[in-house]
Amino acid sequence: MTSALALAAQGPQAASAPLSILIVTDAWAPQVNGVVRTLEMLGRELTALGHEVRYATPQGRFSIPLPTYPEIRLAIFPRRGLETIFRDFAPEAVHIATEGTMGMSARAICIKHAIAFTTSYHTRFPEYVRARFPFVPEGVVYRWLRWFHKPAASVMVATPSLKAELARHGFRNLRIWSRGVDTGTFRRIEEASLPFPKPIWLFVGRVAVEKNIEAFLELDLPGSKVIVGEGPARAALSRKYPEAHFLGPRTGEDLVRVYSASDVFVFPSKTDTFGLVMLEALACGLGVAAFPVPTARDVLSGAPGAALDADLRAACLKALELSHESRGTNASPRSFALEHSWGVCARQFLSNLAPETAE
């Protein structure tokens, strides 16, 4: 193992040179979420740029479901298999995307063999833990996260506000790695329809307590509310709000048709670190309504058809008005989405692999 690990320990070469890149993640298919989608699109773009990308994931390993997140599988004792990947692949750059058992094992290998690595902060674990286990202090979770990310050459975060927030919590070496949208896939299909009264207010995402979906479902709005996604809160919410339409998970063209048939995308989350679904909705021509939290302000700044308000109902009605006014013009929601490509996202990621070249 020594020779291959020694090669990896040299760290990434210049960002413009072809690299062998190992991405370690606990989040992977069949999960459907922003982290998985980001990593999949990142790999596609990096490969198109001439880099060789390999993923180390829980797939094919003995795993158990994460408590309260049964869709997420935690690999059990994955270190030996990871060491084989390090030895055989000899990565020139290592990126640890998540803080689960895969990420922990990769971190231990890198530290043992003095291999430079980067990490990313995708999920607000302190807030998520508090939502499920209120007796666990946020400070304890932040302390563990600081420990996990401290050895990284850079810690990649999606937005400037998240970077500032983590800096206040004592994180260092923070660098921006934004997100993109595939505007070839996500576009408006004019003939798409849903058999529900309009206007249609849409939520897409994990149906879980941290998404704050109930704040949307409680609103007094005309038309229909549609929920796309799966998660532990779906059964309870569908019983409590029988007038809402829970369509379950949708992907690919089916998802694009649901976006296109809707009028406004409602993003009630106050804890997401980015919210890829907002860009997907804009690419399909929808207005977006959200609370004025830092993530929404960062992602939607300057977006036609976007409305932020502490009164979510007011934001919804304003987004409906704005999106109808701007549709088909040069200042449409889709025109904003066209400025956010996965290619830019991949190049940002590459610059962060060599911190001395990053801004």
Image (spheres, rainbow, N blue to C red):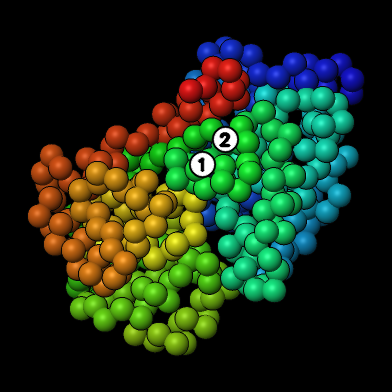
Tell me where residue 231 sits by quadrant: bottom right
Q: Give the quarter of the figure containing the N terminus.
A: top right
Q: Secondary structure at mark 2?
A: strand
Q: Nearer the viewer, residue 248 or 267?
A: 267
Q: Is residue 87 left or right of residue 330?
A: right
Q: Residue at 85% of width from left, 26% of height from top?
A: 113
Q: Residue at 32% of width from left, 40% of height from top?
A: 183
Determine which residue is flagged by label 1. 163
Q: Are marks 2 and 1 in contact (CB under 8 Å)?
A: yes
Residue 73 sits above or below residue 196 on the image:
above
Q: Amino acid at mark 1?
A: Lys
Q: Is residue 200 left or right of residue 96?
A: left
Residue 73 in sight in this render = no
**Residue 167 placement (x, y as % from top left):** 57, 42
The mark nearer the N terminus, 2 or 1, is 1
Label 2 Cα crowd, 10 Å radius (few <14 / some 14-19 / many 20+): many
Tell me where residue 182 sits by quadrant: top left
Label 1 Cα crowd, 10 Å radius (few <14 / some 14-19 / many 20+): many
Q: Secondary structure at mark 1?
A: helix
Q: Residue 174, labelled with which disc?
A: 2
Residue 70 sits above or below residue 146 on the image:
below
Q: Residue at 78% of width from left, 20% of height from top?
A: 9
